């Protein structure tokens, strides 16, 4: 036998199929009559999500429904995977706003840098994960869709433990 | 009371065929769900629970899926046999039910009706003959698919089923020795007491006086219906899905139905041969017997038929539960272990057992002990001893042994002689 091969001690001659089988049967019988089910009935019961869970984005809005975004350009700059497309514009009062603001949620890695860097607390990640769509195009969220999301904003830190201690 | 005339015979037979076939298919559907539920419980899951309350419609959903899926035909398949195989897999398991008595005879306006589709005088031989048909579906499917995995599965299936066929038949011979006939209602009646009316019977369920036969029939029946731990023809780790690898849609569904019908049939046969059939234990009111010439012994009524049918269902259900329980507990045998168990243990021991029972019957008859409860008691004592010897032999690697046995012995020999490095396990 080649060196270094560890041969485990097997029951060998003392092994008994009958008794081992009966022992196994008793174990499965206990579970059969008293299953310790741990299955979560998912669509009926859902996870309790952490407030810091980082899911798909949501844009904060003013009372009149306009997005809070001022099109400063920080979030597409900081985004490590380049999933944010921003084309700024100016209105008649000289205020900047996002003419086009799209996030490709397929490409997004949910790092949360955009939320951290946003100076006006406009773009947020949301506590949300059920995002199934029938086509890839539907995964590019435009500004209107981002504003109409309703999930809670992701908390950047735990309010009970702000310094992560 | 008279037995049935020829005219209504056709009508009642037709009704019985329709009724029992529907019943069998419904029971198969229920069994599929039951198996999945039990599998779930044993593995601490919930089992199917999405379709309908408690998942009751799951099987219906599966059936619809089977019918609607695409039928595929492999290029290399031999189409005629490819189409024939699923039918051959399902039909034998189904028609075995024809000779199984489900309940005590039912009195009707035309006479006493047997609750059995075909009360053939050679019922026992019919069981053995039709049971051996089952292998054709497996072999044909494996060979005609034109796929090496299916072919290997078919080969394994044929070898296994033919091997255990012998053990199956041999384990039933002692029943015929005691029953003195091969008509199945007679074999059921053999297990009931009739207080001196009609031919003498034992009055004891045969799993006691023929315990060893019961064990062998149970094991061989598991192997015949290709259930774990004997499901090598479809060992998915090695053979994808074995003989039905190339089948899709309802053709696969027929293999599936056939497998579950086979399981029900095996359970029903064990019930009939060893667990008293429809006999209700500790109650002599249901001991009703219709002899081959039509004489009725006992008092048939409709509510006894219902009660005995429930009893039969309960026994079969309990056995099926054990099958399912075994399936989700035991690992699959290795192929050589399977063959060793079949040829070197079951066939040999079952043959010896036939001679032992024959000898015991001869001795008991010579001693002038009347055929009855006392007779059965002596046979029971003999069988308790024999089962003890058998289990002692199978245990501890005397007849059958664990997979590691040969390896460990060889290692012990080589390291004992000083050749090779000492193994850490041997300190």
Image (tube, rainbow, N blue to C red):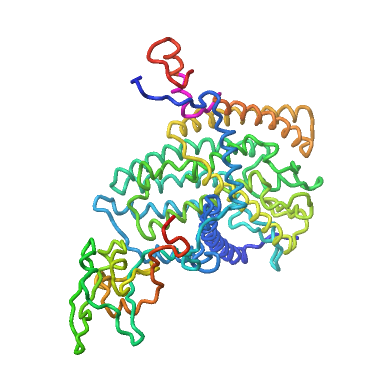
Name the one closer to the observer, B221 or A102: A102
**Residue B141: percent from left, percent from top:** 36, 48
**Residue B412: percent from left, percent from top:** 46, 17
Which residue is most to the front?
A: A163
Residue B392's quadrant in the figure? Answer: top right
Q: Which quarter shows the N terminus of chain B?
A: bottom right
**Residue B185: percent from left, percent from top:** 66, 50
Q: Residue at x 46, y 56 (%)?
A: B257
In magenta segment, residue B408: yes
**Residue B106: percent from left, percent from top:** 69, 62
**Position of B99 relative to B390 (above/below):** below
Residue B310's quadrant in the figure? Answer: bottom right
**Position of B386 relative to B308 (above/below):** above
Name the one closer to the observer, B407 or B247: B407
Name the one closer to the observer, B84 or A113: A113
Residue B128 in sight here: yes
In magenta segment, residue B221: no
Residue A132 in sight here: no
Which residue is most to the right?
A: B195
Horizontal arrangement in the rendering, residue B115 relative to residue B420 (left or right): right
Name the one closer to the observer, B368 or B308: B308
Q: Report the span colored magenta.
A: B398-409
């Amino acid at each position: 036998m080649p060196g270094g091969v560890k041969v485990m001690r097997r029951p060998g001659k003392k092994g008994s199929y009958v008794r081992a089988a009966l022992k196994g049967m008793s174990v499965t019988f206990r579970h059969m009559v008293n299953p310790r089910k741990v299955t979560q009935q998912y669509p009926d019961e859902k996870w309790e999500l952490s407030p810091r869970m980082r899911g798909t984005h949501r844009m904060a809005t003013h009372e009149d429904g306009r997005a809070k975004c001022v099109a400063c350009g920080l979030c597409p700059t900081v985004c490590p995977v380049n999933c944010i497309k921003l084309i700024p514009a100016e209105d008649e009062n000289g205020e900047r706003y996002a003419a086009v603001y799209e996030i490709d949620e397929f490409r997004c890695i949910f790092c949360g840098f955009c939320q951290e860097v946003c100076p006006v607390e406009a773009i947020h990640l949301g506590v949300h994960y059920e995002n199934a769509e029938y086509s890839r195009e539907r995964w590019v969220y435009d500004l209107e869709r981002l504003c109409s999301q309703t999930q809670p904003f992701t908390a950047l830190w735990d309010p009970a433990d702000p310094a992560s201690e | 009371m008279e037995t049935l005339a020829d005219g209504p015979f056709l009508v009642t037979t037709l009704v019985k065929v329709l009724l029992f076939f529907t019943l069998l298919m419904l029971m198969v559907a229920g069994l599929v769900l039951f198996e999945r539920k039990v599998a779930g419980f044993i593995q601490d899951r919930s089992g199917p629970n999405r379709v309908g309350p408690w998942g009751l419609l799951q099987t219906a959903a599966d059936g619809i899926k089977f019918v609607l899926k695409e039928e595929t035909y492999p290029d290399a398949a031999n189409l005629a046999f490819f189409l024939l195989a699923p039918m051959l897999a399902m039909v034998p398991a189904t028609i075995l039910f024809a000779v199984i008595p489900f309940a005590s005879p039912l009195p009707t306006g035309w006479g006493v009706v047997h609750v059995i589709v075909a009360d053939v005088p050679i019922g026992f031989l019919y069981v053995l003959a039709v049971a051996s048909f089952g292998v054709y579906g497996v072999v044909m499917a494996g060979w005609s698919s034109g796929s090496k995995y299916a072919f290997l599965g078919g080969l394994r299936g044929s070898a296994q089923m033919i091997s255990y066929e012998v053990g199956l038949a041999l384990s039933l011979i002692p029943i015929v020795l005691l029953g003195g006939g091969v008509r199945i209602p007679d074999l059921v009646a053999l297990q009931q007491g009739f207080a001196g009316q009609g031919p003498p019977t034992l009055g004891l369920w045969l799993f006691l006086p023929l315990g060893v036969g019961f064990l062998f029939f149970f094991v061989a029946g598991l192997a015949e219906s290709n259930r774990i731990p004997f499901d090598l023809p479809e060992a998915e780790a090695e053979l994808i899905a074995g003989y039905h690898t190339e089948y899709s849609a309802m053709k696969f569904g027929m293999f599936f139905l056939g497998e579950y019908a086979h399981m029900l049939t095996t359970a029903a046969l064990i019930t009939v041969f060893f667990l008293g059939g429809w006999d209700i234990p500790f109650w002599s009111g249901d001991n009703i017997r219709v002899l081959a010439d039509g004489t009725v012994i006992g008092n048939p009524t409709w509510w006894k038929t219902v009660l005995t049918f429930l009893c039969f269902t309960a026994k079969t259900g309990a056995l099926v539960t054990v099958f399912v329980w075994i399936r989700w507990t035991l690992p699959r045998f290795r192929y050589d272990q399977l063959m060793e168990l079949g040829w070197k243990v079951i066939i040999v021991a079952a043959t010896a057992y036939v001679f032992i029972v024959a000898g015991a019957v001869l001795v008991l008859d010579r001693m002038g002990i009347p055929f009855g409860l006392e007779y059965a008691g002596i046979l029971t004592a003999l069988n308790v001893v024999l089962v003890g010897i058998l289990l002692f032999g199978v245990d501890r690697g005397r007849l059958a042994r664990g997979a590691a046995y040969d390896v460990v012995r060889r290692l012990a020999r080589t390291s004992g002689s000083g050749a090779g490095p000492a193994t850490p396990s041997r300190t």
